[in-house]
Image (cartoon, coloured by chain):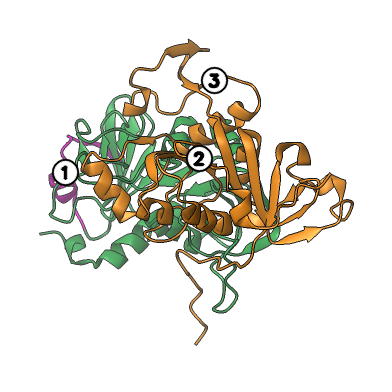
Amino acid sequence: MNKVIASADEAVADVHDGATIMFGGFGLCGIPENLIAALVRNGAKNLRTIANNVGIDGYGTGSLLDAGQIASHTGSYVGENKLLEKLVLAGTLPLRLLPQGTLAEAIRAGGAGIPAFFTPTGVGTLVADGKEVREFDGRQFILERALTADFAIIKAWKGDRLGNLVYRKAARNFNPIMATAAAITIAEIEELVEPGEIDPDHIVTPGIYVHRLVVGERYEKRIERRTVQERAK
Amino acid sequence: MSAAVRLTDQQKRERIARRIAQELRDGYYVNLGIGIPTMVSNYVPSHIDVTLQSENGMLGVGPYPVEGCEDPDIINAGKETVTELPGTSYFSSADSFAMIRGRHIDLSVLGAMEVDQNGDLANWMIPGKMVKGMGGAMDLVASGRRVIIAMEHTTKTGAPKILPKCTLPLTGIKVVDTIVTEMAVIKVTPEGLVLEEIAPDTTVDDVQKATAVKLIVKEPLKTMQL
């Protein structure tokens, strides 16, 4: 078995107009930057994106927004993208905001064959509008639906040709759960290793979830907020 | 005019963070929100161990890196570069929020736009003006564990932020335990908002004037130890 695809462009070639796509990453950390660039080149339109954020203006999934490829978005925090705010306030881009934990659990559930779940998050807020509320053990919970997608486009650190993946540090975030929740999961990695090189106990995403694997051509790994300690004087 | 008005924004923020750090206890797992809450980590007493959780999937958040050692793969929930500590762990966003909703975090410190006398919190949205999203805030307050609000007592224009009822869309209902500002420490109780401590450079009258809810003054009223 060999899931490695020669190029990012080839890996996303069948992403079609109107596709629902999950993108891994938190802010700019752990985003599939090479696959996003390939998707901009692919030009597919009317994409329904699911991602915690929409990158920043002009970078990350923000570049798909700039290119006019996004028709609607589901996420939890989009505060770093001015164009998105403008489009949402103008009423031209439908935005569905979910609490971050609800977003994560909806994706986890989607990948695990669970259609809906009750959560305490958002009770008594706008998030609860139109949703079933039920009491368990004296506390209120709202019913949230699971999320799935046509494609999950994710980023890992190392992988083997079977699709086994490990992540690096906080770049893990939404990537492993999204890998489970899509019909086709496309992962980009920094380093391709031989099967067996990753200790089986350390594999985070087993290869069964990954359909295509691409070694990223180049990594910018842009830092959103560079914070450093003040040097001792 | 109260003396506290003369504090710079940075002095106010430091004061709030310093006071909240006194609420930390040895062995606590704590989530600090963006802004003033993050500054609380600068004032953790040296004799206690506190483990910081960041909802992007990190437990054991260390200080900012020294210049030149920034790692783009090590960030906190504010997307700031941070460092690892011995014993740091990483996990997925689903695991991170299981940890939060599952009541494993002892204390969350969050900022606020408005808090009301019921302990309702608004900190994520201004309709028609601001589109940002709630991020992890709704999950943090829904856990039912202790929530401390770190905020300046009034808005930039001097309007109260502590209200009879929040006017902005809510983050959670009946979720706030304690409010710490540069002027006071206020506890949310079933009887109402209890003024527990005031800053050394203010008076009960000044605090009441800056608050849109009648405060219950605790006797004896303590002075914030700064």
Give the residue pinned by disc 2: A16
Residue A161 in magenta? Answer: no
Give the residue pinned by disc 1: B208
Report the mark closest to the observer, 1 or 3.
3
Q: Amino acid at mark 1?
A: Gln
Measured as percent of width and height from the top left, residue A112 is found at 66, 26
Q: How many marks?
A: 3
State which region is magenta. B202-219
The kind of secondary structure element at disc 2 is loop
Q: Is residue B84 visible?
A: yes
Residue B215 in magenta? Answer: yes
Give the residue pinned by disc 3: A117
Q: Is residue B97 above or below residue B85?
A: above
Q: Quadrant of the C terminus of chain B?
A: bottom left
Q: Amino acid at mark 2?
A: His
Q: Are marks 1 and 2 on the same chain?
A: no
Q: Amino acid at mark 3?
A: Phe
User: Residue under mark 2: which chain is it in?
Assistant: A
The answer to which quarter of the image holds residue A30 is bottom right
Q: Are marks 3 and 2 in contact (CB under 8 Å)?
A: no
- Which residue lies at the image location 17% right of the left edge and 45% below the top edge? B160
- Which residue lies at the image location 58% right of the left edge and 48% below the top edge? A12
As drawn, is A68 to the left or to the right of B44? Answer: left
As drawn, is B84 to the left or to the right of B166? Answer: right
- Which residue lies at the image location 36% right of the left edge and 63% below the top edge? B14
Depth order, front residue of A17/B155: A17
Look at chain A in the picture and name its colour. orange
Look at chain B in the picture and name its colour. green
